[in-house]
């Protein structure tokens, strides 16, 4: 059987993705019941980090530990990648030593090359273009709180970044309508948007974009690697802040999500994370369970 990778949400079928969400909820229940479950016993996950991380590292390490396996953390300072070893060489070497490889890096092309030469599953734990693992957790959280997201309306507020690109893919794969509200010049990938015009649309008017929506999602104004743009971005995004007052325009049962870390007083108001409609802490925890389901799917199928 050909090895499966998870570089974007498009690497799995809609049916597989929905099965993954269902499985994540089951695995969460198993963990809460303290039931011993070790499908990854004697399996090893290699984790390559070229970007800093809290939730991604802890969730993948904990997932492997709780499922009976092991995880090896590798930063760019610890590997020959940091000294110029070709990506394809590292992919071949690690494939002979571990059962799955997770990568958090900058250029999406790097992880595509890595997957091309790897003989074990490769997981995208974030690139500049996509963050599919976060979307698994987001979809799980919505499913737990409101049921199926199919035919619902989701509003993305802010930068057209890797999270926004993944929400465009999610709209196609999970069958919801996506509204994207961002300032001019900060739109998501144009080709991606054009190819998904039946699922996603730009609505610059924030109030109009949020009106009647079932889920509001945002992210920081300046992502990793864009810190020097913070001042200019703060001016451009000043009117694109999510607050309880903005949420009042949404559907009465609407939820709010943020992949974290959040900058209170910038993309969200000081009090937004504590609002009753915010499910960010559940969303963060679900990184653990969604990734357990993903690892199980890729490594034991």
Image (cartoon, helix red, strand yellow):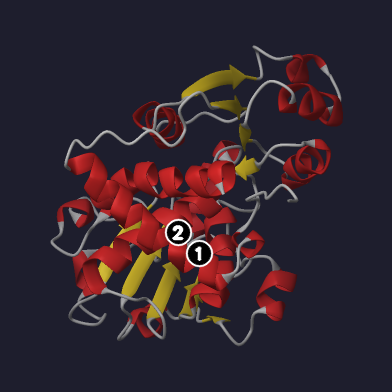
Where's residue 233, x and y in %?
Answer: 52, 52
Q: How many residues crowd around disc 1 within 10 Å: few (fewer than 14), some, or many (20 or more)?
A: many
Left or right side of 223 for 263: left
Please name the residue that numbered disc 1 is placed on. 17
Question: Which of the numbered marks, if any, corresponds to residue 27?
Answer: none
Residue 173, placed above or below residue 74: below
- Provide residue 163's location: percent of width, then percent of height: 52, 56
Along the viewing direction, whichever of 135 and 194 lies nearer the viewer: 135
Q: Residue at x 75, y 50 (%)?
A: 2
| Residue at x 19% of width, y 66% of height | 244
Mark 2 lies on a secondary structure that is helix
Image side of residue 158 versus residue 274, left or right: right
User: Which of the 4 image quadrants contains residue 113?
Assistant: top right
Q: Is residue 7 toward the left or the right of residue 118 in the image?
A: left
* Other-residue count near label 2 (Cα within 10 Å), few / some / many at <14 / 14–19 / ≥20: many
Residue 150, image quadrant: bottom left
In percent of the image, x 40 and y 75: which residue is there? 154
Percent x, y for residue 141? Answer: 31, 60
Q: Position of residue 264 (x, y in %)?
A: 29, 46
Q: Is residue 159 left or right of residue 287?
A: right
Front one among 184 and 4:
4
Distance from the alpha carbon under mark 1 to that under mark 2: 5 Å
Which residue is denoted by mark 2 in the rendering?
20
Relative vertical location of residue 180 with respect to residue 259 in this rendering, above or below = below
Q: Are marks 1 and 2 in contact (CB under 8 Å)?
A: yes
The image shows residue 45, relative to residue 236, as above or below, that is: above
State the residue in front, 279 or 231. 279
């Amino acid at each position: 059987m050909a090895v499966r990778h998870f570089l974007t949400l498009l690497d799995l079928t809609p049916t597989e993705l929905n099965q993954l969400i269902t499985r994540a909820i089951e695995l969460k229940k198993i963990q809460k019941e303290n039931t011993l479950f070790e499908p990854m016993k004697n399996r090893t996950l290699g984790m390559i980090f070229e970007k800093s991380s809290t939730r991604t590292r802890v969730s993948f390490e904990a997932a492997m530990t709780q499922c009976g396996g092991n995880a090896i953390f590798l930063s760019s300072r610890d590997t020959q990648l940091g000294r110029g070893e070709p990506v394809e060489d590292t992919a071949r070497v690690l494939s002979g030593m571990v059962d799955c490889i997770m990568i958090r890096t900058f250029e999406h092309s790097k992880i595509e090359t890595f997957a091309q030469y790897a003989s074990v599953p490769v997981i995208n734990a974030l690139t500049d273009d996509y963050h599919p693992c976060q979307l698994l957790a987001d979809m799980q959280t919505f499913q737990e709180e409101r049921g199926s997201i199919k035919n619902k309306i989701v509003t993305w507020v802010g930068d057209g970044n890797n999270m926004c690109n993944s929400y465009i893919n999610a709209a196609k794969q999970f069958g919801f309508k996506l509204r994207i509200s961002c300032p001019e010049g900060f739109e998501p990938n144009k080709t991606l948007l054009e190819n998904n015009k039946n699922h996603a649309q730009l609505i610059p008017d924030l109030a109009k974009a949020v009106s009647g929506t079932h889920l509001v999602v945002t992210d920081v104004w300046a992502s990793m690697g864009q810190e020097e743009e913070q001042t200019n971005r703060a001016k451009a995004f000043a009117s694109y802040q999510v607050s309880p007052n903005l949420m009042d325009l949404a559907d009465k049962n609407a939820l709010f999500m943020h992949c974290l870390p959040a900058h209170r007083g910038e993309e969200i108001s000081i009090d937004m994370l504590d609002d009753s409609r915010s499910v960010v802490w559940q969303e963060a925890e679900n990184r653990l369970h969604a990734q357990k389901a993903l690892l199980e799917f890729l490594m034991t199928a």
